[in-house]
Structures are given as C-alpha cells and as structure tokens.
Amino acid sequence: MSTVARTPGGEVAAFRDVSKSYGRVRAVNGLDLVLRPGETVALLGPNGAGKSSSLDLLLGLRDPDRGSVSLFGGSPRAAVAAGRVGAMLQSGGLMADVKVRELVTFACAVHPRGHRVDRVLSDAGITELAERRVDKLSGGQEQRVRFALAIAGANDLIVLDEPTTGMDVSVRQAFWASMRAQAAEGRTVLFATHYLEEADSIADRVLVLHRGRLIADGTSAEIKAKAGARRIGFELHPEDGAFEEAVLRALPGTVGLDVTGQPGGVRTVRIRSTDADAGVAGLYRAGLYPRGLEVTSLGLEQAFLTITGEKDAQDDALEESTR
Amino acid sequence: MTTLIQLEIMRTLRNKRYLMFTLLYPALLYVFFINAYSGGEVAGGIPAKSYFMVSMATFGAVGAVLTGSAQKISLERKSGWVRQLRLTALPGRAYTVGKIAACAVTTLPAIGVVFAIGAIEGVRLPAGQWLGLALALWLGSFVFAALGVALGYAAEPDAVQPIVMIVYMLMALFGGTWFPVSDSLKSFARFNPVYLYNQLASFTRPGHGLDTVAVAGLAGFLAVFVAAAAYLYRKDGKAA
C-alpha cells in the first residue's frame, strides 16, 4: 500500500477490500480504492456494475459485508455528521408541499458549515425556480434542486450519482459548468455517470467498474491508451516500395491491424495502438512512407467498450477453464 | 432539527387534503350528528352535542395523526427523501421526531375546530375543564402518532393507505366515535385505543374523575406502539 493511502490527511476516501452482496448478487467485489483531495473522479460502468452500491457504501447508507470504508480518516457517518460530504443520489427524493427556496433554506440551515441560500440557488442555477413548488418540477429541474442540496454547505467531498440524467443538452452543459466550479474551489468531486463525454471532459481521473470490480483506474487518456484506443491510419502506395504485414504487426503498441486494398495497388492500413507515438516513429524507422497519416483517438466510449468486453472474455475463459 | 420540524408543520398545514379530512370532515360530521339527535341525549344520558364533540375531536385528531405519520413516512421512504435526509448532519431520529412534532401541532386545530362548534352549539364547561379536555385529547393523540410511525415503517405506500383506513375505521366503529359502545361490547372495547381515548373525556361529566383505567390502557398502547416503531425504524435504517 502506498504511503499516501496510509496518511489520513492525504486521502479523502478509502475502500479497503470491500465486498457487498445482496442475496446471491455480488454488487461490490473486493474494491480497493483511494480518493485524494482535489480530484475530480468519474465512476464509469454499465448498469449493474456496482456504481450506486459503491456510493451507498461510501456514504455509510449501507455497511460492507467485508472490508472497510473510511471517509476523511473516520467513519462515513461521522464525515456526514460533520458536514464534510454532500451527496446527490439517484434515489434521493425531495420533500413535497414545499417551495424550492424553503427546501434549500432547510439544507443550508442543517449543514454545520452551510452557505447562504441565495449563493446555493445561484450556484445550482435554480434562482429562477426558487418560488416554485418542489412537486411541480420537471425531471431535469429536480436534478438541479438535488444538486443544490449537495452543495448547501462547505463540503470537502461532493458525491453525485448520475447527476445529469433527465437533463436536456443545453442544461447539461450548464450543469457541467456548475460541477467544474465546485472542483475549481478545491473540492473533491466523485460522480457516477453513463455519459462518457461527461467523464472525458470533466474528470481528471476515471474509474471503470465492472461486475463489482475496479478494472481500470487512470486519466481518461490512460484509459483510452489501455484499450489501445488510438487509431493510426495511412495509405501505402506501391511506388514507395513493398512492405510486409509482419513489419506493421511488429510496430510498438500495435493491438489491432487491418489492411485493405489490392496487393500491388494502394493499400489502406488501420492500426489500433496503445502507443501511437512509438508506432508512428517505428513506421519511418522501418523505411515505410505512410501517406495521408492520421492519428485519431477512439474516444472514451470505444475504450470503455473494449475494456469491459475484454474483461468479459477473460471472465468467460476463466469460467470455462474452471468448469 | 427545529428547522425540519418547522418545515414539516408548515407543509402539513398547507396541504389541502389535510384541511379536508382532519378539519372539515369531522366538523361537518359533528354538525350532522347534533342535528340527527336534534339536541337530545345519547344512551347513558349524555347530551349528544357533548358526546360527539369529544368523539369527533378524537376522530379528527386520530385521522390527522395517522395520515400525517403513516402515509407520509411510507411515501417518503419510497421516494428516497428519507435517504436524502440521512446524508445531512441531522441525527437519524430527527426525521421521526419531526413527524411526531408536526402531528402534535396539527391535532390542535382538529380539536379546536370541533370544540369551537361545540361551544357555539351550547356545550357549557368551566374554563378549567375546557383546557383540561383539550390537553387530555392532545396528549392522547401521541399514542396514535406512535402507531402511525410504526405503520409507516412497516408497509409500502400502496399497502399503507388501505391499512390505515381499515385500522382507523374499525377502531372508530367499535370505539364509540359514531355511536356509544353498548355494554355487551365494552369488554372488547377496553382493548381499543380509540375507545380509551374517548374515555379520557369522562372527567367532564358530573360526579366523574379522570378515568385512570383508560389512562393506564393508553399508556400501555403507547409503550407497545413506540417499541414497534423503534424496532421497525432501526430495521429500515439497515436496509435503506
């Protein structure tokens, strides 16, 4: 274990070998994870990957079957009581029969380090909704009120479970700006999301959860790299000399190769690479002359599918071998 | 915690259904009963306007408290508001305490409205008895608040509505709410909290003191309901 993880000052939250089952379903399986101050972390995973369960454990809404969860060096419950954590849950309802302003006023009043109500309303972008009844809001508006409850005080950690669900595109953009503003104030932000774009553009660290396990942890660029998520594309023309496919396959970082076109004619090459820089340098070193060279990112979405797909294949193979 | 209690009280008083069922409905029924008996007496020689003033006040109070606690708690467990509250610095019990406090406040208008009609219709009591009666009925309503909390944690919203209605109506039917309990049924009625609740008013009759048996019975029900509510509340906390 790293020294950072051992000093409570250097960790916001820590999962240590945490497991949680519901009946026969293992929602979280041996999760080890440390969040450090100031990070903006995206939690990615398909439905049923254990995202919401992990957040429940983190917030002390449920207790793990095995392992331990700590927040700011203590129990989640203590951190919540001290007003260090604000959270917006998917399943978090709102009080009916009250106005938005009344609800936010309440949230600010019960927070040990509560902000001014007007500030919270404006930070959450709901100033114009303040006099509306909570039970008369649209889904996206409700989400923003939930967000307001999560930022009602000077929290050190903000936890958001699929915060932009139900928001249309323009509102989502505004919401991301609010999230970034929270992170810019030095708060640690952890959010679960379905939107890869959200993770890519906001998070400086991405966690990929799959079947209750953490299968990738790094920057969005690292996750893409791990998946071989850059594509090198070019053409090889016959007048520039002959080539062997084996040479391409031997390029550093190559995980996938696709060559089209007639032998003896113009060949189109697509390489999926974990290290596009070294791959391109290797092309020239091999004496090739790539034309129309393009290096493109496959995007986090493709990377995500690749990683979880590979993991599925591994798990299936393992099951097969133990059968 | 006071902020939560304030908010709970305000939203209850603002709720139109509350006004309908706990203020208007018992008041209208009371006026109806007075007219039906046309100023006469019910069995046992008590003037109808006095008898039904108490039974309609308790009817309104029990209704206010049961719907205010059982239905709200059940709905808010389902909607996730209870979970959301657990993510605030408030202690876990604050939610339940807030609900009971709101109930306690909202029973007062339910009792007050019926008393006001009674006074207009000619019920005459010494000032001390008015106050004592109001206090007794107000304190008695806590028994039903505890029952409501227990039901709210025991059942899902779909189920809690009919359960509350059935429990409420059966207790009222055999508790002397709409007609006095006949002597043959009195041995059963002793196990009906609404009957005991109505008996709290007996000290206002000439020659009667406070019905200590009713007080003891209600205290027993309170203990049972509080224990059930506490058990169900803790169970819910583990599963939330």
Image: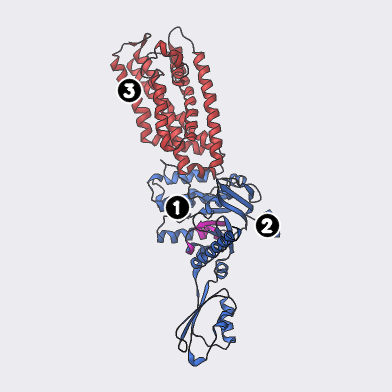
Chain colours: A blue, B red
Q: Residue furthest bottom?
A: A239
Is B46 placed above or below A286 here? above
Q: Residue furthest front?
A: A323
Is B122 placed above or below A315 here? above
- Say left or right for A277 vs B14: right
Q: Is residue A193 found inside the magenta-colored segment of the image?
A: yes
Q: Residues within 10 Å of mark 3 (few under 14, many from 20)?
A: some
Image position, residue B66 (x, y; %): 44, 29
Disc number at residue A5? 2
Image position, residue B186 (x, y; %): 43, 13
Disc number at residue A144? 1
Q: Amino acid at mark 3?
A: Leu
Q: Residues within 10 Å of mark 1 (few under 14, many from 20)?
A: many
Q: Residues within 10 Å of mark 2 (few under 14, many from 20)?
A: some
Task: Tell me where the magenta segment starts and ends, as one range.
Answer: A179-196
Is A5 placed above or below A281 here? above
Residue under label 3: B29
Q: Amino acid at mark 2?
A: Ala
Chain of the residue where label 2 is placed in the rendered structure? A
Numbered disc total = 3
Q: Nearer the viewer, residue B118 or B26?
A: B26
Secondary structure category for the residue under label 3:
helix
Question: Mark 3 to mark 2: distance in Å?
Answer: 68 Å
Quarter of the figure that contains the N terminus of chain A: bottom right
Question: Mark 1 to mark 3: distance in Å?
Answer: 45 Å
